[in-house]
Image (spheres, grey):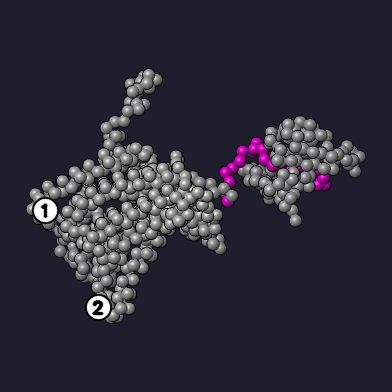
Amino acid sequence: MQGLPGDLIAAAIPVAFIMFVVLNFGGLLTWVERKQSAIMQDRIGANRASILGFRLLGLLHPLADAVKMLTKEDFMPARADRLLFKLAPFVSVFFALTAFASIPFGDTLHLFGRDIPLQAVTLNVGILYVLAMLSLGVYGLMMAGWASASNYALLGGQRAAALMISAEIAIGASIMGVVMVYGSLDLQDIARGQGQPLLPRVFGSWIPAWGILTQPLAFFLFLTAGIAATKRIPFDTPEGESEIIGYFVEYSGMKFGMFAMADFLETVVIAGMTTALFLGGWQVPYLQASGFVFPWGASVALPHLAVVGLQVGSFLFKVVVLIWFLMLIRWTLPRFRYDQAMRLGWLGLFPLSILNIVLTGIVLLALGR
Amino acid sequence: MPTHYQTSRAEMDPRHSNKLSLRQRFYLIEVLVGLKLTGVRFFSNMWKHTLHMFGVKGARGAVTIQYPDERRPYAPRLRSLHRLVRREDGSPRCVACMMCETVCPAHCIYIVASEHPNPDIEKVPQRFDIDLGKCVFCGFCVEACPEDAIRMDTGILEFSSFSRRGMVYDKETLLALEPARPDGAPTSPVPIPADRRV
């Protein structure tokens, strides 16, 4: 397993895993959205699509949706910009997909004498990469709004740009606190840093230094701004289905489906980012590279593959729980008006995240780090 | 600026005030209260769904009635698709007196009378068509009938057709229908419209 083929395989494992997980999560989220909202609202939810009489709790509805969207008329307005109109949904989905690349889902995997880092792209500026990809995703919406030759779509695209700017600034500024605490822009380093004990002189090694404990204010700010970045309710002003319908008003068929897909993919990305930054990433409490080491002295030795499996499972579990929470928010809160969303972004989240940076700096200075 | 019609009740009862309290304007606490409500509801319903799946029939996590498979009970006086009542020998009880055709406000009943072979019975309908595309389901025909020959108790509501012609139900179709069960569930199958018969 030396030489180029081995290198390629080693590089392909994390990429394939990320693609598999993110794409499947994106598809399954349509099912999760239907079922979870139904359970919250005393309903049953979509359960009629079946193959040979097997309904599988409605799990076949995403498939039925895909078949429906692929066979629908693919309409384009007469005065639309043909190239941009066709390109926009692909841009939207592409950047939503690639954003996950630098999020680590496990520590380094040692296999056949190789060290395989469990993230698709090993970047020392991973945070900036994710931010850049999330911001570039909005180009798809602006292109859609401009190319549709429709005033409502244009309004939606403009709103998407405005919302994305106000959310991006809050996201970037709230992450700065995390970066200051863990001293790195590499998401893998941040995930490793969250395995260290929190304030060992006070708590011993009982509490891991997860981001939600070291940066509680940033957690709330990032989550709020992250929900805004997914463009889903309560921050659905670019779509605004009850007022302007938004940037995808002229889209139909699978192109519309891709915009909807991009929203779900961004939900997965935000859940992954929140996990990596605030919920310890792939860390399992008290799990070291050699196995469990409990603070009361006991320890359980585990083989390397079991440790890595636990880490990946832990990461996926946290992502799933966060997605559930994001869905809970989406089906609980009423939507913000456009001006309310802007006010929350610029007068609420942004100053608070600056305050968070200042407070973090003061605390770090006081702790002598 | 408050208008005069808002002030009186708002002063008496703070719950009717349009002004948001500081806690409400902070929003985050209210968000958590709302999330607690829906989250608790989610888990309680999830628990009931799980119990239901394992055979506890009393546990229902949803109020959904899955319509074509399940029906809610209909009231016994519900007016549904008409049927013509039969005599012992299977011939219609109708004597073609034209009362229903006369009383019908929508003019949707069309009767052609003929002689009955039995001299004790005056007439019998040769044709008895009801155009359900016109029928308003007022039930006047049932009330007007002196022979109790037409009833609207089949429980069938799902008749439909792709054409107007298909909405016309003839004597043979209406004679073949049976009354619904006491809970309103139909006992006869939905008749196939005339324009879809092979």
Mark 1, other Cα within 10 Å: few <14 / some 14–19 / many ≥20: few
Mark 2, other Cα within 10 Å: few <14 / some 14–19 / many ≥20: few
Which residue occupies the foreground of this view, A159 or A207?
A: A159
Magenta stretch mostly in which secondary structure?
loop
Vertical arrangement, residue A89 with respect to residue A154, above or below: below
- What element does badge 1 sit on? helix
Q: Which mark is residue B134?
A: none
Choose top left, top right, bottom left or bottom right for residue B136: top right
The residue pinned by badge 1 equals A202
Q: What x and y, as percent, mark residue A151?
A: 45, 42
Which tag is nearer the camera, tag 1 or tag 2?
2
Give the amino acid at mark 1.
Val
Spatial separation of the CA atoms under disc 1 and disc 2? 40 Å
Q: What x and y, as percent, mark residue B122?
A: 88, 37
Segment tinted magenta in the rendering? B69-93
Q: What x and y, as percent, mark residue A75?
A: 53, 52
Quarter in which the C terminus of chain A is drawn: bottom left
Label 1 in the same subunit as label 2: yes
Q: Does label 1 or label 2 sit earlier along the sequence?
A: 2
Horizontal side, residue A291 vs residue B85: left or right: left
Give the amino acid at mark 2.
Gly
- What element does badge 2 sit on? loop
Residue B173 lies within the magenta run: no
Quarter in which the N terminus of chain A is drawn: bottom left
Q: Residue at x 67, y 38 (%)?
A: B79
The residue pinned by badge 2 equals A113
Q: What x and y, as percent, mark residue B172?
A: 78, 47
Q: Chain of mark 2?
A: A
Q: Residue at x 44, y 50 (%)?
A: A147
Residue B91 lies within the magenta run: yes
